[in-house]
Amino acid sequence: MKKTALAEKHEQLGARMVDFAGWYMPVQYSGIIEEHRTVRTAAGLFDLGHMGQVGVTGADALTFLNYIGSNDASVLAPGQAIYSLMLNPTGGVIDDIIIYRNPSGVGYFVVINASNTDKDVSWLQEQAGKRNDLAVQVDHLSDTMGMIAIQGPNAASIVAKLSSVDLSDMESFSMRETQIADVTCMAGRTGYTGEDGWEFYCPVDDSAQVWDALMAAGQDEGLRPIGLGARDTLRLEARMPLYGNEMNDEINPYDAGLGWAVKLDRDDFVGRDALLAVRERG
């Protein structure tokens, strides 16, 4: 099994460790119900180092992302993000993704699901190879990137103690560069719990430093480590979909209740014809 940079931390905290999509991950610490309530009433810290990340750059990066995604990334200003779906030609969902436009305005940063990382990267690179009319480069960043989320009503006050820049005015689905414990991070105001918070992306070798700093800053505000079990119950309560459950490569976005993430009134994208046919059939 693969291990995140924080695996030893989880063991020290007494986590129950399991195999999740080939990763050695904490499923719970004190218990799923207690951890769920902690996130709803205080704050929880999540190791998401198993998630995948991709960089998309080049003069035609936007055109490419609109070709492989169901949503319209052209609406993104620098530092904004959008939820989108990668579809196969029959309209089934390959994966759901978050596309960030880098705050610099140069290139994009795409987050993909842990269980689909290898499949997604191969598919993205295959599509880039087929579109030789586009100047685009797809880089697999997962091995160099750590990802830590803090979620809950106390997340903002905890992060304010550490962040080198003010993050409190960030809108949902936005990104800003900051430093946490002297580590340069990209802070995304996104999450998978239905609570306010951030997902921090940092160099993988600095993950432990960021984790320890957040844990220390949140000690008096009820911050606790949270496992994958509570992450699942939190996202279910918030009605957030999970690949392999509410969607897969045989379920189209409309059947999955994700039609809001499909924009058909634009240039062609993979799966568009199939979805038009679904709409016409009603």
Image (cartoon, helix red, strand yellow):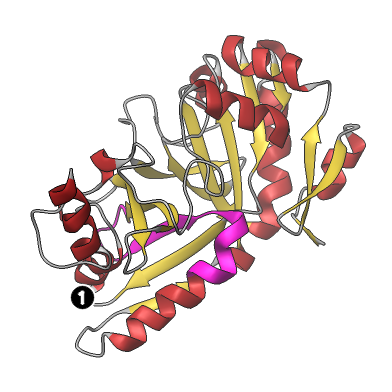
Three-letter code for the amino acid on which mark 1 is drawn: Asp
- Does the image show residue 76? no
Q: Is residue 113 magenta?
A: yes
Secondary structure under tag 1 reads loop
Could you say which is closer to the camera, residue 104 or residue 181? 104
Residue 200 percent location from the top left of the image: 53, 43
Query: Pointer 1: what residue?
Result: 60
Task: Give me the residue at 53% from left, 20% from top.
Answer: 237
Q: Residues within 10 Å of mark 1 (few under 14, many from 20)?
A: some
Determine the residue positioned at 48% across, 53% down: 248
Quarter placement of the C terminus: top left
Instruction: Name the image quarter holding residue 94.
Output: bottom left
Residue 223 image point, x, y percent: 68, 20
Q: Is residue 39 magenta?
A: no
**Farthest-out residue, bottom:** 132
Image height of 81 relative to 267, above or below: above
The part of the chain drawn in magenta is 102-120
The N terminus - image quarter: bottom right
73 horizontally vs 107: left or right:
left
- Look at 55% across and 59% down and name the residue there: 52
